[in-house]
Amino acid sequence: MTPSIILDFDGTIAVGPGPVLAYARLLAPDARPGFLDRVTEALAAHEAGSPEHRDGYDVVGSLARADRVPADALAYAYLASRALLGTPQAPVSTLPDLPAFLADLRRHARVVLATNAPQVGIDRVLAQWGATTSFDAQHFTVGKPAGLVPVLRDALTDGPVLAVGDVLALDLAPALDLGADTALVGPTAATTTAPVTMRAATLADLRTDLQTWAAAAASSTPTPVGVTTRIER
């Protein structure tokens, strides 16, 4: 039996507004005047826990569509912003000692990266963090929520699964439906009423809890899927 921890990337492992602001700056020429000011205000509301938008990219995309920015311009700006990931134009950060943290989890569990984002830019960021080889598998452009289901089902055939992410509807809802454990991070973690297994503002805040889950799941008497004690931080 091999447990699995399935981690989202943006907003979970990688944090900070850099990529989203890069996306907004690329869209600004096609939007109405004051677009960046409206983005800044809406992003602040999202970070404060507003449930209006799914994540920062949804904030920017929704405001751009309201300004009648063409769909092809949205797609181009998104891919261009991803190409800037990890550069001074789109900086991101992560929890301290990410490679050591992932290595510790891998002592007990498979650690899988599963993201809706394309691979472009992510390889550079992982290399900057020294985490290029820190995952047992990497899945890009997954197409969550539906696209996460086969990843989860495959992992569940081997043992308990913990899905970790910042967007409940995309990262965790499929896991909840399949009876897997879940960890919610990010702005909505404190306010959601969903029955997630554990929650915290950041992945760093759940560091010890994730390590405990992995060790328990790999033991001879693992914590059954779906009944891990709920932890709130």
Image (cartoon, rainbow, N blue to C red):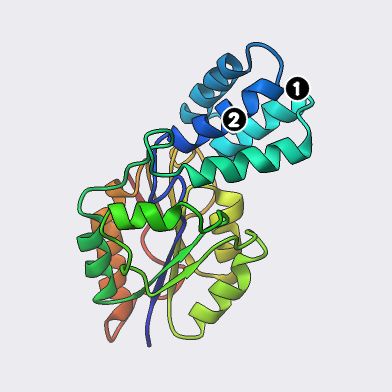
Question: Does residue 49 appear in the picture of this structure?
Answer: no
Q: What residue type is labelled 2?
A: Leu
Residue at left offset 21%, top offset 48%: 96
Mark 2 Cα within 10 Å, few/some/many (few <14, many 20+)?
A: some
Q: Nearer the viewer, residue 124 or 4?
A: 124
* Disc 2: which residue: 26
- Mark on residue 67? 1
Q: Which residue is drawn at 27% across and 69% down?
A: 105
- Relative horizontal placement of residue 160, taking residue 167 as reference (left or right): left
Q: SS class of the residue under badge 1?
A: loop
Viewer can see residue 133: yes
Query: Residue shown at 75%/28% (left/top)?
Result: 69
Give the quadrant of the C terminus.
top left
Say whether residue 1 is left or right of residue 51. Answer: left
Residue type at the position of mark 1: Asp
Of tags 1 and 2, the one toward the viewer is: 2
Reply above or below: 52 against 120: above
For image coordinates 24% across by 68% down, the residue present is: 103
Whole-number angstrom distance, CA of label 1 to CA of label 2: 14 Å
Q: Which residue lies furthest to the top in this view?
A: 33
Give coordinates of residue 213: x percent, y percent: 31, 67
Q: Residue 149, relative to residue 24: is it above or below?
A: below
Q: Quadrant of residue 186?
A: top left
